Image: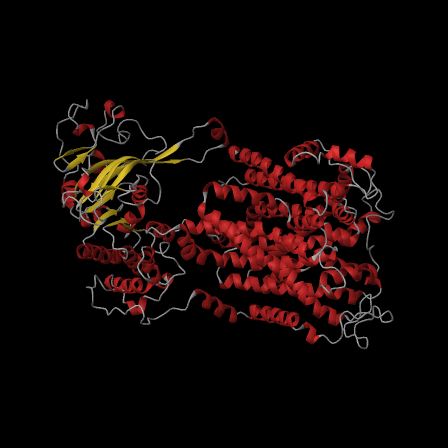
Amino acid sequence: MNMTSTVAGIAPVPAAAEPVERSPGFWSGVVRKLMRDPVALGAGAVLLTLILMAIFAHQLVPSDPYATSMLKRLKPIGFEGFPLGSDELGRDMLSRLMLGTRLSLFMGITPVLIAFVIGSGVGILPGYAGGLVNTLIMRTIDILYAFPSVLLAIALSGALGAGIGNALLSLTIVFIPQIARVAESVTTQVRGRDYVEAARASGASPFTIVRVHVLGNVLGPIFVFATSLIAVSMILASGLSFLGLGVRPPEPEWGLMLNTLRTAIYTQPWVAALPGVMIFITSISFNLLSDSLRSAMDVKS
Amino acid sequence: MSTGISIEHIGAPAGSDRGGPAQPLLTVNKLVKHFDLKKSFVETLVGGGKVVRAVDGVDFKIMKGETLGVVGESGCGKSTTARLLMHLIDPSAGEIVFNGETVGSPQLSLREYRRQVQMVFQDSYSSLNPRLTIQDSIAFGPQVHGVPKQEAVTRARSLLSRVGLEPRRFAGRYPHELSGGQRQRVNIARALACEPRLVILDEAVSALDKSVEAQVLNLLMDLKEEFGLTYLFISHDLHVVRYISDRVMVMYLGKVAETGPAEALFQEPHHPYTRALLSSMPSMDPDHRTEQAALAGDPPNPIDPPSGCRFHTRCPLAEAVCSQRVPILENRNQRETACLIHEPGSGHSLAGTAIHAS
Amino acid sequence: MIFYLLRRIVYTIPIMIGVAFFCFLLVHISPGDPLVSILPPDASIELQQQLMKLYGFDRPWYEQFAHWFWRALHGDLGTSIASGRSVSTEVMRAVGNTLMLSCMATLIGFLFGSLFGFVAGYFRDSWVDRVASALSVLGVSVPHYWLGMVLVIIFSSQLMWLPATGAGPGGSGEWAWDWAHVQFMVLPAITMSVIPMGIIARTVRALVADILAQEFVVGLRAKGLTDLGIFLHVVKNAAPTALAVMGLQLGYLLGGSILIETVFSWPGTGFLLNSAIFQRDMPLLQGTILVLATFFVVLNLMVDVLQTTLDPRIQRS
């Protein structure tokens, strides 16, 4: 910085179409940091495997996950033809666990995704608008927030009745207030920054300001928070199925499998525990990946 | 303080000059901003509650092409005045007349006014969107006012070059990759991108190192000449204000204490507050060192400002009348002073006797 | 501060009304006619009309809500369809069991969580820290109902050290603080304690590391303060926040105990909820949820009030 007032025209001014030196953007920096983080890579690899398993489950399963056999019920791990044993109806555990990835991941991720979209909208708009609208929306959300999440999920799906759709709806309603609260508080912070003031001072409409200046700065932190909810959502979704409120038999889903195998803990304890291992692995991976993402994006918790 | 808007000007295209150089670019009439204090539950029930009188009836003009410096202790309402001028906050009362038109009237919409008045903030980092490249930040304002993207980017790059940042190197960078001085140059370029007539500089150089501050000040003076700008320059640094300003306005507790041409005001302050403020200014010249005590203590609370002249609680020349009578800001020979001593027949024992000893 | 406390208490009133309204709605969002969902399947026409009048389903919803809310305020939560007993009686009996279990779990979780967190924060970035951090990730990631099953497999089915289900040798009869009864509580309490343990460990670790990094602690060390002195200083400064987190966790456990109570057949509110759901006993579901949510709101309020009183530095708007 040793240039005083440079006279106009000394530095050549490239036209808009000409390229200039570009710094890598924020997101490419985040990806670069994640690629250097062994924990993130490990968790990511596990999740990628699970997702691929979910997509190609029907091609990958060694035997029919629905085929029952009265003679081969509750066989131990390593039993011939049943690498991970068989369940209470003699179905192949390995195949059911693999196919179960589908519904389990779907039930865990979908509510957070929907809640991310709705919660961001519900939080950002009042956060930016402030005033009475903000107060009204946030106070309504406070009421849902007054329930512990497990209780809220069970109350809703208990009242709505069992089924995949109702479980998804209940979980989405559980996560919306949490995401909206974070969205509102991040937006309120960003709204007070001088660049938003400067944008208002230049006469931009609120819509333009939110699109250009607010979204880019709030979606990151909200997203990080949402990813930290996926692990919770996985456990809760399987928990609902475990209580018989989510997926209905005979579809394979890890929580439901735990439920039906509960009676087998005295006969084939280790087979009965297997679906829980899957839930555990998935939720750890999501938690670790979310933590890595948080530090890569430098978001304060 | 009539602005003398004549009927024949109504309907003239905005941006055109009104009434020649004698017509002020900006006239502020009885501007008031009271902030509500957060009410307690009981106050909500019984009504009422207190207000902070941040700006409490401020009048001033900014002439075309001049730099008006604004000084005062923190909390005197300098920054609130700037935000009111930008319409970032709504005034509780008063009007702002820009180039002969009342802001917000059918002749001068808020949007058009905002294009012609821009602001540079103190915090160079927080005033740039961290997710936008420098050129996108500068090009944002013109795009809001309908300039096509390509043209706005070209304008941004030429402004970058103009504020001393080589476009090829800086246009594609993000704010965190720049130094404080470089960022403040970007902020200046951003303010100029809408081709404003008035630029409000709210402590714009206060956070910079002294050497960088001097460079940016010089840049501001060059730009002013080149683009025919008018500045409202807010700072707590009296040296800087004296250096850059044509006229200076001194504020105290939400009111104007004194205004006048910079040199005259610094040489010969009229208001006891100005005198106290200047005496707190360290001087390089031992002959000009004042023996007078600098301002003691903090300014009173703007929630419950003193009656009469607001300065009477700290004024060495205060008399009983000062706590009863509110001094009027009156124009005498280019100088305006709100002090009973300068008001003939005010009841103050020194009234009328021009005390010009500093 | 008095004003803050008053405002905080007054603010709880609309929240409670909102919570009550939500519980009121539960009956109405359940599929089918709300009357049908609160009627036993073999209800006579007489009973139908009697209930219709009692619940006022013929009146507009806000009158129904006001009526229901008024009765709830007086402790009348309706009648359980399955047992025919008053919902309040059923819930109150179960709440005691849940409270007992949750408090025990919170206590275990707090003790071990603080220990892990403290050690991890004190020896930041050492292997101890990494092990403790890994444990706390495991703690928040584990599906606790599955952990319960695994503990039952190990300690009941394999080792046969502890009973698997129930709350006492004679079914869920009278509770007593002797080993014959307490042994039933060991596994569910340990399982449940895992949830707050990880969170408390994380909180305490961050608190301790923060306090130790502050300049005045460095100053104290420079002045020659002993390790014990620094330890006491850290405990004093970390305690209010850690206790607040513990209080909130107790609230979450009260509401979240349903899965664990189901695994261990513990006769608490979660078990009650489970049976209410499967017998479509809507008044029981509604009443239990209302009581649990009220506990949670009141606990939140108490934590806030206590924290403000203990630590006046906390500025709140």
For the C terminus of chain B, give its image quadrant: top left
Q: Is residue B171 left or right of residue B18?
A: right
For the N terminus of chain B, give its image quadrant: top left
The chosen color scheme is: secondary structure
Front position in the image: C204 or B326: B326
Q: Is residue C132 visible?
A: no
Task: Give how far across and how far down residue C32 sits, in percent.
Answer: 72, 46
Task: Give how far across and how far down residue C166 sits, in percent.
Answer: 82, 50
Q: Is residue C243 visible?
A: yes
Vertical relation: B352 (above or below) C204: above
Residue C55 found in image quarter: top right
Front position in the image: C88 or B249: C88
What residue lies at 33% left-to-right and 63% top-to-bottom?
B149
Residue B9 found in image quarter: top left
What residue lies at 65% left-to-right and 54% top-to-bottom?
C197
Front position in the image: C172 or A170: A170
Front position in the image: C182 or B163: B163
Residue B133 found in image quarter: bottom left
Task: Give how far across and how far down residue B80 sits, in percent.
Answer: 32, 42
Vertical relation: C198 (above or below) C287: below
